[in-house]
Amino acid sequence: MKSARLYGHDDLRIEDVPDPRAGSGEAVVEIHASGVCPSDIRSYTGSGTAKRDPWTPGHEVAGVITELGDGQTGGFSVGDRVVLDWRGVCGRCHECARGAANFCENLVKFPIAGFAEATVMPVGQLRAVPDGLSLEAASFCEPLACVVNAHRGLAMPLACNVLVVGAGPIGLLHTQVARSRGARVIVADMKADRLATATALGAHDVVDASAGDTRQAVRALTEGRGADVVIVTVGSPAVISSAFELVARNGAVNLFAGTHPKGTVELNPDVPHYDQVAITGSHDFVPNDFATALRLLGFGMVDVAPLISHRFSLDSVVDAFETTRQQKGLKSLVVTGR
Ligand SMILES: [Zn+2]
Ligand SMILES: [Zn+2]
């Protein structure tokens, strides 16, 4: 079969590799949709974790089971449509036991290797795609699960003001989840087309961060108070700093994005102290977040169709990576067209 293999910086090749075979308790999944994630781009440009051997990126993946190994099938059959969860958690360690399986002490990171024609995974890492949900849409399950993890940690009373900073694919997922939770959602971004998509996906108000004073605009929309929850989806220290000027007293700032390259932010400690502002973060997801993400997609509570700006064949995977690297459009998917 064909597989994309990353040899080093800017060196991603399509190669013929042996077809995967299902061992005991495993399934071969023919891949139909595989999303390009900013973390894939960091590996591609060399700004991410260095790996010595050639490897196949791709962890936002949906496909169809074509083969099941002996033993446990997890209730799956050949032909079932599935999404793949790369996080193998033990369910028994200290972190898993207290509901924080995103920090599982025995985590197994299954290399999904999604930019290929097929892959093999333990059946326990597969989740059935609801009827009526396309495999393209289902491939958003992994990033949406990360968004769900953030929301589990954020109080969001009905009609509170939520500001989403950044209207990229992640910001647009946050926008819809916050809207589903009954919040009044404000979205800030520098790009007019992204703000238009945010409005189409349910944002009540948008702020053009390229024009004028974002702080003033957010204050004007919130009776001078700032937002009760600020979700920062941009990993820039300057943008993160600005969040503390946009949040209301007794509010919360969620730092959803890591900084790349690594950066530091000066914090006025009187903001968390006197204004009682909580600073939270979120990373990865627990298995139930993955299930919740599938339900959000399956029930139509989160619409990802407007987020898919580019589709590429596997042969054009380099174009898909370059498109995301140049921040063209929103999400690039590698699809088989089936
Ligand atoms: Zn990702
Ligand atoms: Zn564990």
Image: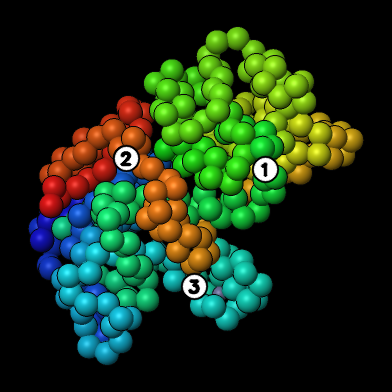
Q: Are the residues at dot 2 and dot 3 in contact (C-beta closer than 8 Å)?
A: no
Q: Position of residue 32 (x, y in %)?
A: 20, 55
Q: Is residue 14 visible?
A: no
SS at badge 1: loop
Residue identified by numbered label 3: 89
- Amino acid type of disc 3? Val
The answer to which of 184 and 166 lies nearer the viewer is: 184
Viewer-proximal residue among 61 and 229: 229
Q: Residue at x 67, y 33 (%)?
A: 161
Q: Is mark 3 within 8 Å of ligand 2?
A: yes
Can the viewer see residue 90 in this picture?
Answer: yes
Query: Going from the N terminus, do you reach mark 1 or mark 3 first?
Result: 3
SS assignment at label 3? loop
Furthest-right residue in this view: 274
Disc 2 to disc 1, C-alpha distance? 27 Å
The residue at 35%/36% (across/down) is 307
- Graded by Cα atoms within 10 Å as few (under 14), some (14 to 19) or many (20 or more), the crowding at tag 2 reads few
> The residue under label 2 is which amino acid type?
Ala
On screen, 207 above or below 249?
A: above
Q: Residue at (56%, 68%) from the top-left corner?
A: 101
Residues at marks 2 and 3, CA–CA distance in whole angstroms: 30 Å
Residue 45 versus residue 19: which sits nearer the camera?
19
Task: Give the residue displayed 49% in from the left and 67% down from the top.
Answer: 287
Ligand 2 occupies quarter = bottom right
Q: Secondary structure at mark 2?
A: helix
As displayed, is residue 215 above or below residue 307?
above
Q: Which mark, by number, is residue 158?
A: 1
**The residue carrying mark 1 has its beta carbon less than 8 Å from ligand 1:** no
Residue under label 2? 305
Is disc 2 in contact with disc 1, using a CB cutoff of under 8 Å?
A: no
